[in-house]
Image (cartoon, rainbow, N blue to C red):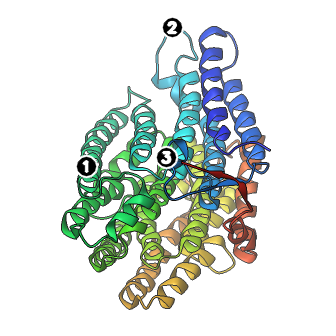
């Protein structure tokens, strides 16, 4: 049995070891570094099922446990971050030839080691975000993730689109960081606290001024809105998603968004006693649903379509947040992980042979039936076809909205789901009904094939039997005798 915080330490050490191996072992095939990272992260994922019971943390605790929590939500999303990073590294192995062609260094494999190491450090930041219960730790963990993404987004630096994406992400992310720090300053100035539980307790006192605290929370929401790609903070998403290396786009779309929603769930808890907060979230959710789905309709580039789709899915997740259903949000994020990573895994392979436009997938069903079937499963799940994880995720979200009488969100959500069927299924139409411009079969590595099969099995399996995810969020046994004292 190991303490939960050892998981982040193990991932951080793994990243440092990978960098040292890359620096001193120049003649090895750098793709073996990615394999080592996958094995290491898999070992950490396995260790996460043998954690010591979380200590009971008293309300007035100080020190480490006032910053860090090992509750079921945190453990669940630590595993989420590990699984996401493993699949992203598999995609990066397929993407390695493009990195080699765009980075001209001393050796033919220049840059590959760092390309495989940075996601490991990003994973450590995502895991810390899942456990952060203090504004200081939230800020530090977000910065670790964001700085890693600065480099990853513009990694193929000879590509003008990648450079443009990197600059946009850098500037807008820096602005959102300013909003976050300014919002934390206002909240601390009003309550005198940075720990979320103590902030919640302070807000119940009659002498606390509600207006400045609400203003500070709005500023924090602006920063988190950037992370989750909610309207009107989504302006960076299409260009950054299109310009970044495809595996990095997948990592941004899944890992960064999931961690942003975990932080949002924790940060909003002290402020939900204010009725204004719910109204603000309802408006943001409606705007996000409408904009994301309508903007995706005319897209001809699959990466841009998935970018606007990511905005739309942020809207569905916000319905769960407004409805105070952490279980629905968690399940939807797992479904989104499976179907989005599957779509990007196919895109990485196909784009190297033909391109990333939807018309480049024409006739894929005849050329590469396995890749076409994998993309079919991803698209129908993203659309919400029954017996897929995407369908059950939407069912849980709308069920939570019905229980909380969120009529406006339900109406807008159902209408926008219909829009999703159109733009997702036009990819299916291209693969199976349009003539192929290229009859050459697309090669696929054994590792990538196995990863796609696992993702497809997860999509279908969780669509039929979702109970494992719901059980994972139930509270685990605690250790009363090891209660953390002041």
Instruction: Identify the residue at horizontal 33%, vertical 40% (top origin).
Output: 165
Toward the viewer: 212 or 172?
A: 212
Q: How many marks?
A: 3
Residue 207 placed where, x, y %?
23, 69
Please determine whether, in this image, residue 102 is positioned above or below residue 348.
above
Sequence-wise, which precedes: disc 2 or disc 3? 3
Instruction: Identify the residue at horizontal 61%, vertical 62% (top origin).
Output: 334
Instruction: Identify the residue at horizontal 48%, vertical 12% (top origin).
Output: 105
Q: Nearer the viewer, mark 1 or mark 3?
A: 3
Toward the viewer: 475 or 356?
A: 475
Toward the viewer: 306 or 422?
A: 306
- The residue at which mark 1 appears reads as 185
Q: Is residue 250 visible?
A: no
- The residue at which mark 2 appears reads as 106
Q: Separation of disc 1 and disc 3 at Cα? A: 20 Å
Residue 38 placed where, x, y %?
70, 36
- The local crowd at label 1, few if under 14, some if 14 to 19, many if 20 or more residues have their Cα within 10 Å, is some
Labels 1 and 3 touching (C-beta < 8 A): no
Q: Separation of disc 1 and disc 2 at Cα? A: 47 Å
Q: Secondary structure at mark 3?
A: loop
Could you tell whether 163 is left or right of 210 in the image? right
- The residue at which mark 3 appears reads as 62
Residue 419 placed where, x, y %?
42, 78
Labels 1 and 2 touching (C-beta < 8 A): no
Q: Separation of disc 2 and disc 3 at Cα? A: 50 Å
């Amino acid at each position: 049995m190991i303490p939960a915080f050892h998981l982040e330490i193990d991932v951080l050490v793994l990243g440092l070891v990978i960098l040292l191996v890359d620096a001193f072992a120049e003649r090895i095939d750098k793709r073996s570094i990615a394999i080592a990272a996958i094995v290491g992260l898999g070992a950490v994922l396995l260790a996460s099922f043998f954690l010591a019971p979380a200590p009971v943390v008293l309300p007035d605790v100080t020190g480490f446990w006032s910053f860090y929590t090992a509750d079921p939500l945190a453990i669940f999303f630590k595993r989420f971050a590990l699984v996401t990073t493993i699949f992203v590294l598999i995609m990066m192995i397929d993407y390695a030839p493009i990195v080699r062609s765009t980075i001209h260094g001393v050796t033919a494999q220049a840059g590959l080691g760092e390309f495989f190491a940075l996601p490991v450090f990003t994973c450590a930041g995502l895991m810390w975000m899942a456990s952060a219960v203090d504004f200081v730790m939230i800020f530090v963990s977000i910065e670790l993730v964001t700085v890693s993404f600065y480099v990853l987004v513009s990694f193929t630096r000879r590509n003008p689109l990648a450079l443009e994406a990197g600059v946009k992400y850098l500037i807008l992310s820096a602005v959102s960081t300013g909003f976050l720090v300014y919002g934390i300053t206002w909240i601390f100035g009003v309550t005198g606290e940075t720990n979320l539980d103590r902030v919640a307790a302070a807000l119940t006192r009659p002498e606390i001024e509600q207006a400045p605290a609400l203003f500070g929370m709005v500023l924090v929401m602006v920063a988190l809105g950037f992370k989750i790609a909610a309207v009107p903070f989504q302006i960076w998403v299409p260009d950054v998603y299109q310009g970044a290396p495809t595996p990095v786009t997948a990592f941004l779309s899944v890992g960064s968004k999931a961690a942003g929603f975990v932080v949002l769930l924790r940060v909003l808890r002290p402020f939900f006693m204010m009725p204004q907060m719910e109204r603000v979230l309802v408006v943001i959710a409606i705007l996000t649903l409408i904009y994301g789905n309508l903007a995706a309709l005319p897209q001809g580039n699959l990466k841009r379509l998935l970018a606007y789709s990511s905005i739309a899915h942020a809207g569905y997740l916000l319905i769960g947040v407004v409805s105070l259903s952490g279980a629905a949000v968690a399940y939807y994020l797992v479904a989104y992980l499976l179907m989005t990573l599957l779509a990007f895994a196919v895109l990485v392979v196909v784009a190297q042979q033909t391109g990333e436009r939807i018309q480049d997938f024409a006739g894929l069903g005849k050329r590469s039936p396995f890749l076409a079937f994998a993309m079919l499963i991803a698209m129908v799940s993203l659309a919400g076809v029954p017996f897929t994880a995407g369908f059950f995720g939407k069912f849980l979200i709308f069920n939570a909205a019905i229980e909380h009488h969120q009529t406006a969100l339900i109406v807008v959500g159902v209408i926008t789901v219909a829009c999703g069927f159109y733009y997702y299924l036009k990819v299916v139409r291209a693969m199976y009904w349009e003539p192929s411009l290229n009859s050459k079969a697309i090669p696929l590595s054994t590792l990538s094939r196995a990863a796609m099969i696992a993702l497809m099995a997860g999509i279908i399996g969780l669509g039929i039997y979702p109970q494992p995810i719901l059980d994972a969020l139930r509270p685990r046994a605690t250790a009363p005798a090891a209660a953390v004292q002041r």
